[in-house]
Image: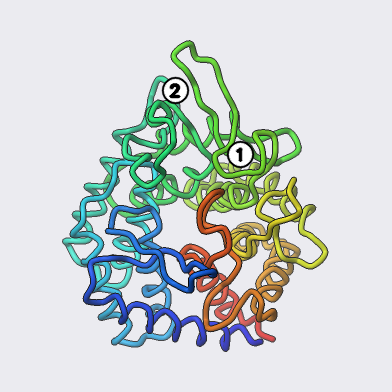
């Protein structure tokens, strides 16, 4: 399948979905394969920004004013709802308000961006050197221990917080660079192993003892594959903004581990140490990460691998059908075999970038 054809299928799927939920207060976040029904949220979930982001991606590529109208509507719909105070503010704001600002420069969007960037920066723990998961973390992850809210670092924050803060620092007269740099270094110190694989989380107790573990992966000592891609993507984006060679070196290190562990069938596993469960979202997040690395290094192997990862899913109707990326996984104990908004978002991003680079089948 050609990349453009896959993008057209995805566009039709998303447009149908947004019109279905246009008059509703809920946001679709993942499609359960067993029931065939979309799981929805009330506007206070970390995944909602991705649907809005897909709409902005589609508008940016197709320049269809009808898509822009819906993108604006969904952006405003999301921003009317107060965001939970977590590290995921960046996911929510970057893919809605920031992408909206890049297309229409509305003052209200700028106001929202700055407000939430300041909130995100305010939860930074100077004594620990990182942005913790945040007080409202348990609102959409019920069952998690509340004590982690203020003193746990997770690999996800490399994507959920730092690119947003870096963008704000580069576009508005606000400087979060010290927070960004300290958090990125602390992530490397606590979560990156010598072989380039990553832990998902490190909890620091009141005695400053460090406990490395996972919420999502196969085991505390394994490497959750999506977390690995969050790391590659995050460090690469930080390098693109700050030009700190250390961040590029870390991104390369994480990418090296990732590429060496791509399975023979090219469909990524949910965890590198568990070869029983697949997660196709790792393909497309990984592909987008490697495209970004190629742009910074011009090393063609990164681009070739990205193309391979995207082709592996779009050329297999088991993984891509009806315009959606199938067999992705929301989290360890929920949405184990689903179509997720973040999966569809990063597929749209990878397809658009490859098409714009002139790469087609």
**Residue at point 54% right, 65% down?**
338
Quadrant where the image shows the C terminus: bottom right
**Eye-nearest disc, 1 or 2:** 2
Q: Where is residue 71 in the image (x, y as percent from the top left)?
A: 30, 75
* Residue 249 appears in view: no
Between disc 1 and disc 2, whose residue precedes? 2
Q: Quadrant of residue 100?
A: bottom left
**In the image shown, does 112 or 37 lie closer to the viewer?**
37
Q: Most extreme residue toward the front, as rendered?
A: 35
**Residue at point 43% right, 30% down?**
145
Q: Dot 2 corresponds to which residue?
A: 128
* Residue 58 appears in view: yes
Q: Could you tell me which secondary element the residue under label 1 belongs to?
A: helix
Q: Distance between the residues labelled 1 and 2?
A: 20 Å
**In the image shown, does 196 or 252 lie closer to the viewer?**
196
Q: In this view, does 247 lie to the left or right of 120?
A: right
Q: In this view, does 269 lie to the left or right of 49?
A: right
Q: Most extreme residue toward the right, as rendered?
A: 264
- The relative height of residue 324 versus residue 204 in the rendered view (above or below) is below
**In the image shown, does 44 or 179 lie closer to the viewer?**
44
* Disc assigned to residue 246: 1
Q: Position of residue 207 (x, y in %)?
A: 48, 11
Q: Where is residue 216 in the image (x, y as percent from the top left)?
A: 57, 44
- The relative height of residue 209 versus residue 132 in the rendered view (above or below) is above
């Amino acid at each position: 399948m050609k990349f453009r054809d896959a993008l057209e299928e995805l566009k039709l799927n998303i447009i149908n979905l947004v019109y279905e939920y246009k008059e509703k207060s809920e946001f679709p976040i993942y499609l359960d394969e067993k029931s065939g029904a979309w799981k929805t949220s009330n506007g206070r979930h970390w995944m909602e920004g991705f649907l809005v982001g897909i709409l902005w991606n589609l508008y940016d590529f197709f320049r269809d004013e009808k898509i822009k109208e819906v993108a604006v509507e969904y952006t405003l719909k999301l921003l009317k709802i107060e965001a939970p105070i977590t590290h995921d503010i960046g996911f929510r704001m970057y893919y809605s308000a920031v992408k909206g600002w890049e297309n229409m420069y509305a003052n209200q969007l700028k106001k929202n961006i700055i407000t939430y960037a300041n909130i995100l920066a305010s939860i930074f723990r100077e004594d620990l050197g990182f942005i913790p998961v945040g007080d409202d973390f348990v609102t959409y992850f019920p069952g998690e221990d509340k004590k982690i809210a203020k003193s746990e670092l997770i690999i996800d924050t490399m994507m959920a917080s730092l690119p947003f803060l870096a963008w704000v620092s580069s576009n508005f007269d606000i400087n979060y660079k010290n927070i960004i740099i300290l958090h990125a270094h602390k992530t490397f110190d606590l979560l990156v192993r010598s072989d380039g694989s990553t832990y998902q989380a490190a909890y620091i107790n009141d005695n400053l003892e460090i406990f490395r573990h996972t919420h999502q992966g196969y085991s505390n000592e394994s490497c959750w594959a999506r977390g690995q891609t969050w790391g590659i993507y995050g460090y690469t984006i930080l390098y693109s903004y700050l030009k700190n060679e250390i961040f590029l070196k870390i991104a390369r290190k994480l990418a090296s581990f990732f590429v060496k562990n791509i399975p023979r069938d090219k469909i990524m596993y949910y965890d590198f140490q568990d070869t029983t469960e697949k997660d196709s979202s790792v393909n497309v997040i990984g592909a987008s990460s490697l495209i970004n690395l190629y742009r910074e290094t011009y090393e063609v192997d990164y681009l070739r691998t990205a193309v391979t990862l995207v082709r592996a899913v779009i050329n297999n109707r088991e993984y891509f059908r009806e315009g959606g990326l199938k067999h992705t996984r929301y989290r360890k104990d929920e949405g184990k075999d689903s179509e997720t908004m973040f999966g569809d978002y990063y597929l749209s991003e990878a397809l658009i970038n490859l098409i714009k680079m002139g790469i087609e089948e």
